[in-house]
Image: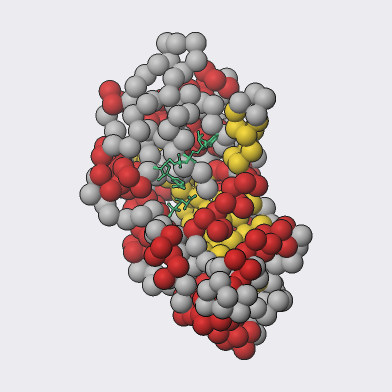
Amino acid sequence: MSAPVKPIIGITLGDPFGNGPELTAYALADGKLYEQCRPLVVGDATSMAYALKVAKKVRGLDLSLNIIKTPAEGKYTPGTVDLLDLNLIPAEEIPDTLDQDAPKAYGVGACPLGGEAAFSYVVKVIDLAMNGEIDATVTNAISKEAINMAGHHYSGHTEIYADYTHTPKYTMMLAHHDLRVVHVSTHVSLREACDRVKKDRVLDCIRIANEGCKALGIKEPRIGVAGLNPHSGENGMFGWEEVQEIQPAIDEALAEGILIPEKKPTPPDTIFSKALGGWYDIVVAMYHDQGHIPLKVKGFVYNRAEQHWEAVEGVNVTLGLPIIRASVDHGTGWDLAGTGRSSELSLVNAIEYALQMVKAKKEA
Ligand SMILES: NC(=O)c1ccc[n+]([C@@H]2O[C@H](COP(=O)([O-])OP(=O)(O)OC[C@H]3O[C@@H](n4cnc5c(N)ncnc54)[C@H](O)[C@@H]3O)[C@@H](O)[C@H]2O)c1
Ligand SMILES: O=C(O)[C@@H](O)[C@H](O)COP(=O)(O)O
Protein backbone atom coordinates (compact mmCIF):
# COMPACT_ATOMS: atom_id res chain seq x y z
CA MET A 1 0.00 0.00 0.00
CA SER A 2 1.40 3.43 -0.94
CA ALA A 3 1.85 6.09 1.78
CA PRO A 4 -0.90 8.74 1.93
CA VAL A 5 -0.05 11.98 0.15
CA LYS A 6 0.88 14.61 2.72
CA PRO A 7 -0.94 17.95 2.50
CA ILE A 8 0.92 20.98 1.18
CA ILE A 9 0.75 23.90 3.63
CA GLY A 10 1.51 27.28 2.04
CA ILE A 11 3.22 29.56 4.58
CA THR A 12 3.57 33.28 3.81
CA LEU A 13 6.67 35.10 5.09
CA GLY A 14 4.61 38.04 6.37
CA ASP A 15 6.20 41.48 6.37
CA PRO A 16 9.78 40.84 5.18
CA PHE A 17 11.08 43.36 7.77
CA GLY A 18 9.07 41.70 10.54
CA ASN A 19 9.74 38.49 12.46
CA GLY A 20 8.07 36.14 9.91
CA PRO A 21 11.19 35.04 8.00
CA GLU A 22 13.17 33.95 11.07
CA LEU A 23 10.11 32.31 12.67
CA THR A 24 9.60 30.33 9.47
CA ALA A 25 13.20 29.13 9.62
CA TYR A 26 12.77 28.04 13.24
CA ALA A 27 9.44 26.28 12.67
CA LEU A 28 10.71 24.40 9.60
CA ALA A 29 13.87 23.31 11.40
CA ASP A 30 11.72 20.74 13.19
CA GLY A 31 12.08 17.64 11.03
CA LYS A 32 8.99 16.03 12.61
CA LEU A 33 6.80 18.55 10.79
CA TYR A 34 7.73 16.89 7.50
CA GLU A 35 6.24 13.60 8.71
CA GLN A 36 2.80 15.28 8.61
CA CYS A 37 2.94 17.76 5.74
CA ARG A 38 4.82 19.39 2.88
CA PRO A 39 5.56 22.98 3.97
CA LEU A 40 5.86 25.47 1.10
CA VAL A 41 7.06 29.00 1.87
CA VAL A 42 5.72 31.88 -0.23
CA GLY A 43 7.88 34.99 -0.03
CA ASP A 44 11.24 36.34 -1.11
CA ALA A 45 14.46 34.37 -1.46
CA THR A 46 16.51 37.35 -0.23
CA SER A 47 14.60 37.64 3.07
CA MET A 48 14.52 33.89 3.65
CA ALA A 49 18.25 33.55 2.89
CA TYR A 50 19.06 36.26 5.46
CA ALA A 51 16.77 34.62 8.04
CA LEU A 52 18.52 31.26 7.49
CA LYS A 53 21.86 32.92 8.26
CA VAL A 54 20.38 34.45 11.43
CA ALA A 55 19.02 31.00 12.40
CA LYS A 56 22.50 29.52 11.89
CA LYS A 57 24.19 32.21 13.93
CA VAL A 58 21.69 32.38 16.82
CA ARG A 59 20.58 28.74 17.09
CA GLY A 60 23.22 26.87 15.07
CA LEU A 61 20.59 25.59 12.60
CA ASP A 62 21.78 24.35 9.23
CA LEU A 63 19.05 24.78 6.64
CA SER A 64 19.35 25.18 2.89
CA LEU A 65 17.06 27.03 0.50
CA ASN A 66 15.38 25.45 -2.51
CA ILE A 67 13.92 28.17 -4.73
CA ILE A 68 11.04 26.89 -6.83
CA LYS A 69 8.44 28.17 -9.29
CA THR A 70 5.56 25.75 -8.60
CA PRO A 71 4.54 23.65 -5.57
CA ALA A 72 5.27 20.49 -7.56
CA GLU A 73 9.00 21.38 -7.67
CA GLY A 74 9.39 21.22 -3.88
CA LYS A 75 11.65 18.61 -2.24
CA TYR A 76 9.78 18.71 1.08
CA THR A 77 12.56 17.05 3.03
CA PRO A 78 13.83 18.09 6.49
CA GLY A 79 16.75 20.51 6.31
CA THR A 80 15.57 22.19 3.10
CA VAL A 81 13.23 25.17 2.95
CA ASP A 82 11.19 25.11 -0.28
CA LEU A 83 10.36 28.66 -1.27
CA LEU A 84 8.24 30.10 -4.03
CA ASP A 85 10.13 33.32 -4.77
CA LEU A 86 8.12 36.43 -5.62
CA ASN A 87 11.37 38.35 -5.99
CA LEU A 88 10.20 41.68 -4.57
CA ILE A 89 12.86 42.53 -1.96
CA PRO A 90 16.30 43.53 -3.26
CA ALA A 91 19.03 42.05 -1.02
CA GLU A 92 20.52 45.51 -0.38
CA GLU A 93 17.27 46.61 1.32
CA ILE A 94 17.84 44.12 4.16
CA PRO A 95 20.03 45.68 6.88
CA ASP A 96 22.83 43.13 7.36
CA THR A 97 24.34 42.98 10.86
CA LEU A 98 25.60 39.41 10.70
CA ASP A 99 29.18 40.51 11.30
CA GLN A 100 28.21 41.56 14.84
CA ASP A 101 28.20 39.19 17.81
CA ALA A 102 24.40 39.23 17.95
CA PRO A 103 22.34 40.23 14.87
CA LYS A 104 20.47 43.51 15.39
CA ALA A 105 16.80 44.24 14.70
CA TYR A 106 16.19 45.41 11.12
CA GLY A 107 14.76 48.64 12.44
CA VAL A 108 12.93 49.25 9.15
CA GLY A 109 9.36 49.11 10.46
CA ALA A 110 6.29 49.77 8.34
CA CYS A 111 7.20 50.82 4.79
CA PRO A 112 5.61 50.56 1.32
CA LEU A 113 8.23 48.05 0.09
CA GLY A 114 7.51 45.62 2.93
CA GLY A 115 3.77 46.24 2.67
CA GLU A 116 3.67 45.53 -1.06
CA ALA A 117 5.67 42.32 -0.66
CA ALA A 118 3.64 41.08 2.33
CA PHE A 119 0.39 41.77 0.48
CA SER A 120 1.62 39.95 -2.65
CA TYR A 121 2.59 36.82 -0.66
CA VAL A 122 -0.93 36.69 0.82
CA VAL A 123 -2.64 37.07 -2.55
CA LYS A 124 -0.39 34.38 -4.03
CA VAL A 125 -1.08 31.84 -1.31
CA ILE A 126 -4.83 32.44 -1.55
CA ASP A 127 -4.62 31.91 -5.29
CA LEU A 128 -2.73 28.61 -4.83
CA ALA A 129 -5.33 27.37 -2.33
CA MET A 130 -8.30 28.46 -4.45
CA ASN A 131 -6.77 26.59 -7.42
CA GLY A 132 -6.35 23.47 -5.30
CA GLU A 133 -2.54 23.50 -5.66
CA ILE A 134 -2.09 23.55 -1.88
CA ASP A 135 -4.26 22.19 0.94
CA ALA A 136 -4.12 24.98 3.51
CA THR A 137 -2.56 28.38 4.14
CA VAL A 138 -0.69 29.70 7.17
CA THR A 139 0.27 33.36 7.51
CA ASN A 140 3.02 35.22 9.34
CA ALA A 141 2.25 38.74 10.54
CA ILE A 142 1.77 41.68 8.21
CA SER A 143 1.65 45.32 9.19
CA LYS A 144 -1.71 46.90 8.46
CA GLU A 145 0.03 50.26 8.25
CA ALA A 146 2.54 48.95 5.69
CA ILE A 147 0.00 47.34 3.36
CA ASN A 148 -2.03 50.54 3.43
CA MET A 149 1.13 52.59 2.70
CA ALA A 150 1.52 50.35 -0.36
CA GLY A 151 -2.00 51.27 -1.47
CA HIS A 152 -3.86 48.13 -0.37
CA HIS A 153 -6.68 49.40 1.77
CA TYR A 154 -7.51 46.45 3.98
CA SER A 155 -7.55 46.26 7.76
CA GLY A 156 -5.85 42.86 7.87
CA HIS A 157 -5.49 39.37 6.46
CA THR A 158 -9.07 38.53 7.44
CA GLU A 159 -10.52 41.11 5.08
CA ILE A 160 -8.04 40.28 2.27
CA TYR A 161 -8.96 36.60 2.47
CA ALA A 162 -12.70 37.37 2.54
CA ASP A 163 -12.39 39.64 -0.49
CA TYR A 164 -10.17 37.41 -2.61
CA THR A 165 -12.25 34.31 -1.87
CA HIS A 166 -15.57 36.19 -2.35
CA THR A 167 -16.76 35.27 1.14
CA PRO A 168 -19.57 37.49 2.48
CA LYS A 169 -19.92 35.94 5.96
CA TYR A 170 -16.76 35.23 7.93
CA THR A 171 -15.25 35.88 11.33
CA MET A 172 -11.87 35.95 13.05
CA MET A 173 -11.23 33.21 15.59
CA LEU A 174 -8.38 33.33 18.10
CA ALA A 175 -7.44 30.15 19.90
CA HIS A 176 -5.08 29.17 22.68
CA HIS A 177 -5.33 25.40 22.93
CA ASP A 178 -8.98 24.72 23.94
CA LEU A 179 -9.83 28.37 24.55
CA ARG A 180 -11.43 29.77 21.38
CA VAL A 181 -13.14 33.04 20.58
CA VAL A 182 -14.79 34.56 17.51
CA HIS A 183 -15.56 38.24 17.10
CA VAL A 184 -18.68 40.10 15.98
CA SER A 185 -16.39 42.94 14.80
CA THR A 186 -12.61 43.33 14.58
CA HIS A 187 -10.64 46.30 13.28
CA VAL A 188 -13.04 49.18 13.89
CA SER A 189 -13.21 51.85 16.61
CA LEU A 190 -14.79 50.86 19.91
CA ARG A 191 -17.59 53.36 19.20
CA GLU A 192 -18.35 51.68 15.88
CA ALA A 193 -17.99 48.23 17.42
CA CYS A 194 -20.98 48.93 19.71
CA ASP A 195 -23.08 49.89 16.68
CA ARG A 196 -22.13 46.65 14.96
CA VAL A 197 -23.74 44.48 17.64
CA LYS A 198 -26.80 43.62 15.54
CA LYS A 199 -28.97 40.52 15.73
CA ASP A 200 -28.15 39.27 12.21
CA ARG A 201 -24.38 39.60 12.64
CA VAL A 202 -24.45 37.99 16.11
CA LEU A 203 -26.49 35.10 14.69
CA ASP A 204 -24.06 34.71 11.76
CA CYS A 205 -21.15 34.58 14.20
CA ILE A 206 -22.88 31.94 16.33
CA ARG A 207 -23.53 29.84 13.21
CA ILE A 208 -19.96 30.28 11.90
CA ALA A 209 -18.54 29.45 15.35
CA ASN A 210 -20.66 26.27 15.40
CA GLU A 211 -19.50 25.20 11.92
CA GLY A 212 -15.91 26.28 12.69
CA CYS A 213 -15.78 23.99 15.73
CA LYS A 214 -17.14 21.13 13.62
CA ALA A 215 -14.39 21.85 11.08
CA LEU A 216 -11.95 21.25 13.93
CA GLY A 217 -13.51 17.88 14.65
CA ILE A 218 -15.71 18.93 17.62
CA LYS A 219 -18.95 17.02 17.03
CA GLU A 220 -21.39 18.97 19.26
CA PRO A 221 -19.91 22.40 19.90
CA ARG A 222 -21.02 24.24 23.04
CA ILE A 223 -21.11 27.98 22.51
CA GLY A 224 -20.89 30.83 25.02
CA VAL A 225 -22.22 34.19 23.84
CA ALA A 226 -20.86 37.27 25.63
CA GLY A 227 -22.90 40.33 26.49
CA LEU A 228 -21.67 43.75 25.43
CA ASN A 229 -22.36 45.80 28.54
CA PRO A 230 -21.32 45.38 32.20
CA HIS A 231 -23.25 42.48 33.74
CA SER A 232 -24.87 41.93 30.33
CA GLY A 233 -26.82 45.15 30.81
CA GLU A 234 -28.94 44.02 33.82
CA ASN A 235 -32.15 44.07 31.75
CA GLY A 236 -31.52 47.44 30.16
CA MET A 237 -30.08 49.29 33.18
CA PHE A 238 -26.65 49.53 31.53
CA GLY A 239 -27.58 49.24 27.85
CA TRP A 240 -30.16 47.50 25.68
CA GLU A 241 -28.03 45.51 23.21
CA GLU A 242 -28.43 42.26 25.14
CA VAL A 243 -32.23 42.51 25.13
CA GLN A 244 -32.73 43.93 21.64
CA GLU A 245 -29.96 42.25 19.61
CA ILE A 246 -28.09 39.45 21.36
CA GLN A 247 -30.95 37.52 22.99
CA PRO A 248 -33.01 37.35 19.75
CA ALA A 249 -29.93 35.97 17.96
CA ILE A 250 -29.44 33.37 20.70
CA ASP A 251 -33.12 32.36 20.54
CA GLU A 252 -32.94 31.82 16.79
CA ALA A 253 -29.69 29.82 17.09
CA LEU A 254 -31.24 27.64 19.81
CA ALA A 255 -34.25 27.03 17.55
CA GLU A 256 -31.83 25.81 14.87
CA GLY A 257 -30.47 23.26 17.34
CA ILE A 258 -27.20 25.06 18.15
CA LEU A 259 -25.99 24.33 21.67
CA ILE A 260 -25.76 27.47 23.82
CA PRO A 261 -25.79 26.00 27.34
CA GLU A 262 -26.75 29.20 29.16
CA LYS A 263 -29.40 30.24 26.59
CA LYS A 264 -28.66 33.95 27.24
CA PRO A 265 -25.78 36.44 26.95
CA THR A 266 -23.14 35.69 29.58
CA PRO A 267 -21.67 38.64 31.52
CA PRO A 268 -18.41 39.44 29.74
CA ASP A 269 -16.30 39.62 32.91
CA THR A 270 -16.76 35.94 33.75
CA ILE A 271 -17.37 34.28 30.39
CA PHE A 272 -13.68 33.55 29.78
CA SER A 273 -13.14 32.08 33.26
CA LYS A 274 -16.05 29.77 32.48
CA ALA A 275 -14.58 28.95 29.07
CA LEU A 276 -11.26 28.06 30.72
CA GLY A 277 -13.21 25.87 33.13
CA GLY A 278 -14.61 23.91 30.20
CA TRP A 279 -18.13 25.37 29.94
CA TYR A 280 -17.85 26.02 26.19
CA ASP A 281 -15.83 25.02 23.12
CA ILE A 282 -15.97 28.56 21.77
CA VAL A 283 -17.02 32.05 22.86
CA VAL A 284 -18.69 34.67 20.67
CA ALA A 285 -17.17 38.02 21.70
CA MET A 286 -18.86 41.29 20.78
CA TYR A 287 -15.72 43.18 19.69
CA HIS A 288 -11.96 42.82 19.04
CA ASP A 289 -10.45 43.44 22.45
CA GLN A 290 -13.21 41.67 24.41
CA GLY A 291 -11.93 38.49 22.77
CA HIS A 292 -8.27 39.37 22.19
CA ILE A 293 -7.35 40.49 25.71
CA PRO A 294 -8.13 37.20 27.53
CA LEU A 295 -6.54 35.16 24.74
CA LYS A 296 -3.34 37.21 24.73
CA VAL A 297 -3.13 37.39 28.53
CA LYS A 298 -3.07 33.61 28.36
CA GLY A 299 -0.73 33.27 25.36
CA PHE A 300 1.74 36.15 25.80
CA VAL A 301 3.85 35.48 28.89
CA TYR A 302 6.52 38.04 29.82
CA ASN A 303 9.32 37.04 32.15
CA ARG A 304 9.59 39.98 34.51
CA ALA A 305 12.92 38.96 36.09
CA GLU A 306 14.73 38.20 32.82
CA GLN A 307 12.83 40.82 30.82
CA HIS A 308 11.93 38.81 27.75
CA TRP A 309 8.89 37.07 26.31
CA GLU A 310 8.74 33.58 27.76
CA ALA A 311 5.97 32.45 25.44
CA VAL A 312 4.04 34.05 22.62
CA GLU A 313 1.45 31.47 21.79
CA GLY A 314 -1.96 31.31 20.12
CA VAL A 315 -3.54 31.04 16.70
CA ASN A 316 -5.68 33.25 14.52
CA VAL A 317 -8.04 31.40 12.13
CA THR A 318 -10.47 32.91 9.63
CA LEU A 319 -13.73 30.96 9.80
CA GLY A 320 -16.29 30.84 7.01
CA LEU A 321 -13.81 30.75 4.09
CA PRO A 322 -13.82 28.14 1.32
CA ILE A 323 -10.09 27.58 2.04
CA ILE A 324 -8.15 26.98 5.26
CA ARG A 325 -6.29 29.89 6.84
CA ALA A 326 -4.51 29.78 10.19
CA SER A 327 -2.06 32.40 11.39
CA VAL A 328 0.24 33.55 14.15
CA ASP A 329 -1.70 35.71 16.60
CA HIS A 330 1.14 38.14 17.33
CA GLY A 331 2.33 41.00 15.18
CA THR A 332 5.50 41.78 13.26
CA GLY A 333 7.52 42.24 16.48
CA TRP A 334 9.48 45.16 15.00
CA ASP A 335 11.70 45.48 18.09
CA LEU A 336 12.91 41.86 17.78
CA ALA A 337 12.65 41.18 14.02
CA GLY A 338 16.05 40.28 12.59
CA THR A 339 17.62 39.39 15.96
CA GLY A 340 16.59 35.74 15.87
CA ARG A 341 15.18 36.09 19.39
CA SER A 342 11.47 35.77 18.54
CA SER A 343 9.50 32.70 19.61
CA GLU A 344 8.13 30.44 16.86
CA LEU A 345 5.51 28.85 19.15
CA SER A 346 2.56 30.68 17.62
CA LEU A 347 3.62 29.77 14.08
CA VAL A 348 4.02 26.13 15.11
CA ASN A 349 0.52 26.29 16.70
CA ALA A 350 -0.86 27.75 13.46
CA ILE A 351 0.64 24.98 11.31
CA GLU A 352 -0.76 22.37 13.71
CA TYR A 353 -4.21 24.01 13.58
CA ALA A 354 -4.15 24.07 9.79
CA LEU A 355 -3.27 20.38 9.74
CA GLN A 356 -6.08 19.60 12.15
CA MET A 357 -8.51 21.41 9.83
CA VAL A 358 -7.20 19.58 6.74
CA LYS A 359 -7.74 16.27 8.55
CA ALA A 360 -11.26 17.18 9.72
CA LYS A 361 -12.14 18.35 6.18
CA LYS A 362 -11.03 15.00 4.73
CA GLU A 363 -13.06 13.07 7.29
CA ALA A 364 -16.21 15.21 6.87
N1 LIG B 1 -1.28 38.35 12.64
C1 LIG B 1 -1.02 39.57 12.18
O1 LIG B 1 -0.87 39.78 10.98
C2 LIG B 1 -0.87 40.69 13.17
C3 LIG B 1 -1.34 40.58 14.50
C4 LIG B 1 -1.16 41.66 15.38
C5 LIG B 1 -0.51 42.81 14.95
N2 LIG B 1 -0.07 42.89 13.64
C6 LIG B 1 0.72 44.03 13.15
O2 LIG B 1 1.99 44.00 13.81
C7 LIG B 1 2.49 45.32 13.97
C8 LIG B 1 3.03 45.48 15.38
O3 LIG B 1 1.96 45.32 16.32
P1 LIG B 1 2.11 45.31 17.90
O4 LIG B 1 3.40 45.97 18.27
O5 LIG B 1 0.85 45.81 18.45
O6 LIG B 1 2.15 43.76 18.30
P2 LIG B 1 3.32 42.68 18.28
O7 LIG B 1 2.64 41.38 18.54
O8 LIG B 1 4.13 42.78 17.04
O9 LIG B 1 4.27 43.04 19.50
C9 LIG B 1 3.85 43.01 20.88
C10 LIG B 1 5.05 42.52 21.73
O10 LIG B 1 5.20 41.11 21.51
C11 LIG B 1 6.53 40.83 21.07
N3 LIG B 1 6.45 39.75 20.10
C12 LIG B 1 5.68 39.69 18.98
N4 LIG B 1 5.87 38.52 18.37
C13 LIG B 1 6.76 37.82 19.11
C14 LIG B 1 7.34 36.54 18.99
N5 LIG B 1 7.05 35.70 18.00
N6 LIG B 1 8.24 36.15 19.94
C15 LIG B 1 8.55 36.97 20.97
N7 LIG B 1 8.03 38.20 21.14
C16 LIG B 1 7.14 38.61 20.21
C17 LIG B 1 7.04 42.11 20.45
O11 LIG B 1 8.43 42.13 20.42
C18 LIG B 1 6.38 43.17 21.33
O12 LIG B 1 7.15 43.36 22.50
C19 LIG B 1 1.33 46.25 13.60
O13 LIG B 1 1.67 46.86 12.38
C20 LIG B 1 0.11 45.37 13.44
O14 LIG B 1 -0.68 45.76 12.33
C21 LIG B 1 -0.23 41.86 12.77
O1 LIG C 1 -4.64 41.73 16.96
C1 LIG C 1 -4.63 40.64 16.40
O2 LIG C 1 -3.96 39.68 16.76
C2 LIG C 1 -5.45 40.49 15.17
O3 LIG C 1 -6.55 41.31 15.21
C3 LIG C 1 -4.52 40.82 14.07
O4 LIG C 1 -4.48 42.17 13.82
C4 LIG C 1 -4.60 39.94 12.90
O5 LIG C 1 -5.55 40.29 12.00
P1 LIG C 1 -5.57 39.59 10.60
O6 LIG C 1 -4.40 40.09 9.86
O7 LIG C 1 -5.53 38.13 10.83
O8 LIG C 1 -6.86 40.03 10.00
Give the x, y percent position of residue 81: 48, 35
Number of numbered labels in the structure image: 0
Camera sees residue 329: yes
Residue at the image point whose x is 51% and y is 82% from the top: 244
Image check: 324 left or right of 214? Answer: left
Query: Observer-nearest residue: 321 or 300?
Result: 300
Relative to 310, say whether 216 is above or below.
below
Q: Quadrant of residue 308?
A: top right
> How is this picture coloured?
secondary structure
Q: How far across and how far down the image is residue 60, in percent? A: 57, 20
Q: Nearer the viewer, residue 359 or 2?
A: 359
Residue 60, above or below 251: above
User: What x and y, as percent, mark residue 299?
Assistant: 62, 45
Residue 86 vertical placement versus 158 (above, below) = above
**Residue at 32% across / 45% down in the picture?**
145
Q: Does the image show residue 5?
A: no
Quarter occupied by the N terminus = bottom right
The quarter holding residue 312 reads top right
Give the quadrant of the C terminus.
bottom right
Left or right, residue 47 beside residue 52 = left
Q: Locate residue 318, reporting x and y percent.
A: 49, 60
Q: Say which residue appears at 46% left-offset and 77% top-offset.
A: 198
Q: Which residue is at the far left?
A: 151
Q: Is residue 322 above or below residue 175?
A: below
Among all residues in the image, which is located at the extreme right? 277
